[in-house]
Image: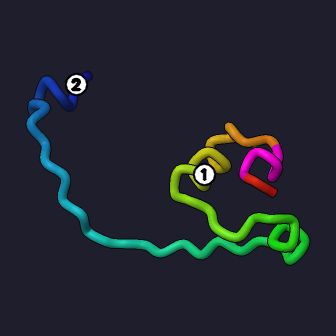
Amino acid sequence: MEGVEVYGDNFEPFPIAIDAVAIAISSDVYEGGIKNLSRRQLLSMHNGDVDSWNELGG
């Protein structure tokens, strides 16, 4: 890696912004039992690890 050789690898995180995301589900999913989702569950959905709402309690 050319950048690491030139600049080293002693970087520190420096947040420049915070973003909010709203999650919306259909009434059918809500009525099917999905009342709350954890961050871990949302991440699993985003990563494709969850194939069905049933895996989340729906």
Q: In this view, does 52 lie to the left or right of 19?
A: right
The alpha-carbon separation of the residues under discs 1 and 2 comes to: 38 Å
Name the element at disc 2.
Answer: helix
Q: Position of residue 13 (x, y in %)?
A: 19, 52
Q: In this view, does 38 lie to the left or right of 14?
A: right
The quarter of the picture where residue 32 lies is bottom right
Of labels 1 and 2, the one closer to you: 1
Query: What residue lies at 64% left-to-right and 49% top-to-bottom?
Result: 46
Does the magenta segment cover residue 53?
A: yes
* Disc 1 residue type (three-letter): Gln
Name the element at disc 1.
Answer: helix
Q: Is residue 30 left or right of residue 9?
A: right
Residue to which mark 1 is pinned: 41
Residue range in magenta is 52-56
Residue 5 vs residue 25, the one in the foreground: 25
Residue 3 vs residue 17, the one in the foreground: 17
Q: Of label 1 and label 2, which has the lower sequence position?
A: 2
Q: Is residue 2 left or right of residue 5?
A: right
Dominant secondary structure of the residues highlighted in magenta in the image: helix
